Image: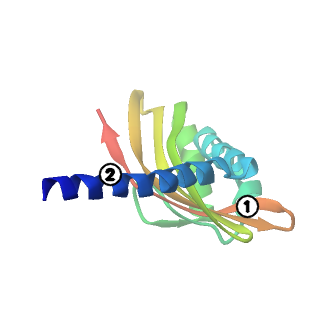
Amino acid sequence: MKKMLAVLALVGLALLRPLAASAAADAAKIEPEVLALREAAWRAWFAGDTAALEKMLPPEFIGISMEGPLTPLPRTLEESRGFRDSGGRLLSLEFPETQAQRYGDVVVLYGRYAVKFTSGGSEQSVSGRLTEVFVRRDGRWMHPGWHLDTVVTP
């Protein structure tokens, strides 16, 4: 019985290896334009660069931010501006894990993020999970929505 379980475990691992390689290959296929747009949107938000955000986020944008309710584009721009105006500043931004699904002109990114920033005179580290949507419209990628959750790191 133990020998049979060991054989089944080895067969299972052999079958999973190609799936893991396929997932890694799929992650490598994420369009560079989409990844660049994601990075630019995060950096623009933390910089309070609402002009840049308005070029990336369409009027129908809906975000579920790290905290708070659903936010349409005007509220998202207001929160970004408020962060900057209160002296907030991005110190570091990382996306340690990203996977994507593409459906024609729509890409959905799933992953994790980690940010360090100053706010209210103190440094904060926040990490969590993300789901972000990107749509190709009129030949360019737009970012119509995101959903972020958080785990605060002391």
Quadrant assignment, res 8: bottom left
Residue 51 in view (yes/no): no
Position of 68 with respect to 80 (left or right) is left
- Which structural element holds mark 2? helix
Left or right? Give the position of 27 relative to 20: right
Residue 10 — which label? 2
The spot of residue 72 in percent (x, y) is 58, 67
**Disc 1 or 2, which lies upstream in sequence?**
2
Residue 142 tag number: 1
Residue 48 image offset from top left, x and y in percent = 63, 43
Give the x, y percent position of residue 113. 48, 44
Q: CA distance from mark 1 to mark 2?
A: 45 Å
Q: Residue furthest left?
A: 1
Q: Mark 1 touching mark 2, by CB under 8 A?
A: no
Quarter of the C terminus within the rendering? top left
Q: How many marks?
A: 2
Under mark 2, the amino acid is Leu
Q: Which label belongs to residue 9?
A: none
Mark 1 residue crowding within 10 angstroms, few (<14) / some (14–19) / many (20+)? many
- Which three-letter amino acid code belongs to the residue tagged 1? Met
Where is residue 146 shown, x and y percent of the image? 55, 61
Residue shown at 48%/32% (left/top)? Answer: 117
Image point 40% across, 40% down: which residue? Answer: 126
- Image vertical order of residue 80 relative to residue 123, above or below: below
